[in-house]
Amino acid sequence: MGAGFLISIGEPLFHSDPEGLIGKQALRGRRAFQVDVAMPPSLTLYELTGADDDLRFSPHCWKIRMALLHKGLEADRRPWRFTEKDAIAFSGGATVPVLVDGDKTVTDSWRIALHLEEHHADRPSLFGSETGRSYARFVNSYADTVLVAPLRHLLTLDILARVHEKDRDYFRASREKRFGQPLETHAGDPAVHIPAFRAALTPVRTVVAEQPFLSGAAPAYADYCAFGALMWARCVSPLRLLEKDDPVYGWRERMLDAFGGHARAAACTEQDA
Ligand SMILES: N[C@@H](CCC(=O)N[C@@H](CS)C(=O)NCC(=O)O)C(=O)O
């Protein structure tokens, strides 16, 4: 999705190229050449990052990353770590994702999705309709509560191992306060939490057993909400959380392949079989 300019000699034509039209135009024999000037994206997305700059593991940031791809928008994706509160203080919040879009700064993934839908209304819709927006809102809520609960047990020690050294004490202290117990106790036994996670996926399973995506024939924001939780797991954990014959596994494969395999190519801990 590289931005570029098409300059046509003899015929004034000048446009950015979000759809990759440059090659197609050139093939039609137009006397054109691409000027290799990188157009800086006007959007900035702050994303939670592990010790490794490329390990972007936040479920909420993944929702927005997929939403931007859906809209065909490019963002400068800035790495951010838990203890770098000063870097996002301008947003008025203390969590990521934070999106800066021109003169607007938006926090909270749901609010960012609404912003993208409203301010980039000429791009493909994240929701399809008002009813679709309510459906996505429900899936977002389900993902952030029911789906994330068993994952917190399964992933917490993996996250601790993967965050930057400077974040480690903060992560342990803030999560132990939140969970009311030591991380090691909270992690418990994967043999207990994996079946709980698979059971929590029942609403997704029943839908994607009947249709390719939660949103129907093509993915949309409802899919990105649930997929964000699965990317959280894929990024930090080597555990195989889904059986290959699970319809959720097939759906996740389709999501990993979406947008040219963007999510599949992202840095992660899980090994593709
Ligand atoms: N409801 C918020 C949740 C955002 C959130 O909790 N983000 C986490 C990363 S996944 C965070 O930034 N935590 C900072 C902290 O714990 O200090 C959203 O959907 O954006």
Image (cartoon, grey):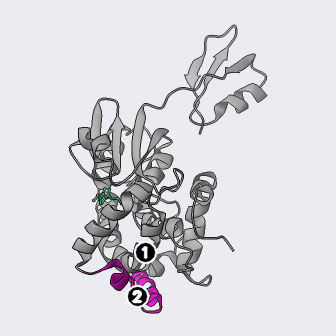
In the image, 190: left or right of 180?
A: right
Does any atom of ligand 1 lie closer than 8 Å to the CB of label 1? no
Quarter containing the C terminus: bottom right
The mark that comes first in sequence, 2 or 1, is: 1
SS category of the residue bearing label 2: helix
In the image, 174: left or right of 34?
A: left
Q: Nearer the viewer, residue 180 or 21?
A: 180
Instruction: Pick out the residue farthest to the top.
Output: 10
**Does the stretch in magenta take in 198?**
yes
Q: Considering the whole magenta stretch, tell me its main secondary structure.
A: helix
Q: Position of residue 239 (x, y in %)?
A: 55, 79
Q: Nearer the viewer, residue 85 or 16?
A: 85
Q: Type of residue at label 2? A: Ala
Residue at the location (27% across, 68% down)?
Answer: 173
Residue at the location (30% across, 55% down)?
Answer: 110
Question: How far apart are the two marked residues, 2 and 1, measured between alpha carbons?
Answer: 18 Å
Q: Nearer the viewer, residue 105 or 47?
A: 47
Q: Residues within 10 Å of mark 2 (few under 14, many from 20)?
A: some
Q: Nearer the viewer, residue 199 or 28?
A: 199
The dot on residue 157 is 1
Q: Type of residue at label 1? A: Leu
Q: Position of residue 205 (x, y in %)?
A: 47, 80
Residue at the location (40% across, 77% down)?
Answer: 151
| Residue to which mark 2 is pinned | 196
Q: Position of residue 272 (x, y in %)?
A: 66, 70
Q: Which residues are magenta?
A: 181-202
Q: In what quadrant does ligand 1 lie?
A: bottom left
